[in-house]
Amino acid sequence: MGSTQLCKPPCGRQGHRSVYLKSQHKIVIFGGYAGYHLDDFFVYDIKENMWSLMEECHDDGNSNRLSPREVFSMVLNEQRQSIVFFGGKDEDYRYNDMHEFSLVTKKWYRLHQGGPRKKIDSPKKTTVPKETLLNIPSPRSSHSCIMIEKLQQMVMFGGYDGDDWLNDCWIFDFTLNKWTKVNLFTKHLSENSLKIFQHGFSSHVAVFDDIRSEMLAFGGWTGEMDINAMWTITFPTLNELEFQSKLGNIIDRNQLSDISIITFSSS
């Protein structure tokens, strides 16, 4: 990762995000909240048990650098050797901008500007123009994102926009540099699970199982209660029969209690 500036450990915080650099045995941490919103960028060397500041190139004046915020998403794109950030919030706004930090050039890039920011604590419900919603996800925080390396796609699900808890699902294709909203099929959900899904939720966690080609999300907050459901979003195969068989295998699985099945296709 080049030269590093050793430093003290990060201050206590919440709402920050991290990724693991497997090839370097290091953890990268960005931002969060500690009584004020942070934009500090740290690297923890697991082998050496040492903290350092992330090396950053300032040739462009950091005009594309992520602003201080919390509860955003942060994923590692191994093929591009970069870290990708989306959304989050600060004291005033929720965002739907998307930034990328190159681990090679140490530069920040803006993948898209995002639509109108959504004001925090607005006296009335705010809306985002339809033309924005058709192209990119709405401003949000406490959503989840996972990376599918072999497809060079990032999948985002749920979150909170300041007014509503969300249940929408989007895919960002790094090859096309484009967002696509996907339709979620929920016919396999129980009545209770369907009710939770339709309401939407935030603050869940998600991972991608590249062996089974499914995204698993656990827990979350509906605004009224914490939930302990395990959701799976299954990615269709090219063969519909294989896809149906895969669903059957998931439904029969009994290692997890309270599994809900969600499958999707592009809209």
Image: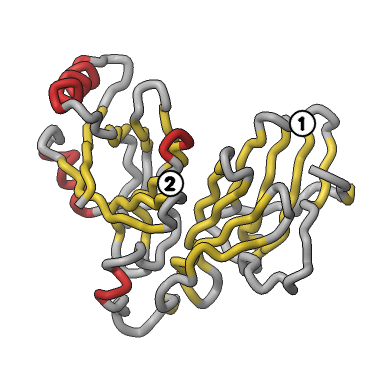
Residue at x-position 18% and y-position 26%: 239
Left or right: where does residue 246 sit relative to residue 79? left
The mark found on residue 46 in the picture is 1
Label 1, residues with CA under 10 Å away: few <14, some 14-19, many ≥20: few
Image quarter in which the N terminus is found: top right
x 74%, y 74%: residue: 61
Q: Secondary structure at mark 1?
A: loop
Question: Where residue 29 is drawn, which disc sits there?
Answer: none
Q: Label 2 is placed on what type of residue?
A: Met
Q: Nearer the viewer, residue 177 or 260?
A: 177
* Viewer-nearest residue: 169 or 242: 242
**Residue 221 position (above or below residue 34):** above
The image shows residue 148 at horizontal and vertical percentages of: 44, 37
Whether 64 is drawn above or below 215: the answer is below
Residue 163 found in image quarter: bottom left
Q: Is residue 251 visible?
A: no
State which mark lies toward you, 2 or 1.
2
- Give the residue type that dot 1 points to: Ile
Left or right of 57, for residue 214: left
Residue 59 image-quadrant placement: bottom right
Tag 2 residue: 154
Residue 12 shown left or right of residue 192 in the figure: right
* Image location (x, y in percent) of residue 173: 40, 50
Compare residues 238 and 212 and report the one nearer the observer: 238
How many numbered discs sit on the rendered protein? Answer: 2
Query: Which is nearer the N-term, disc 2 or disc 1?
Result: 1
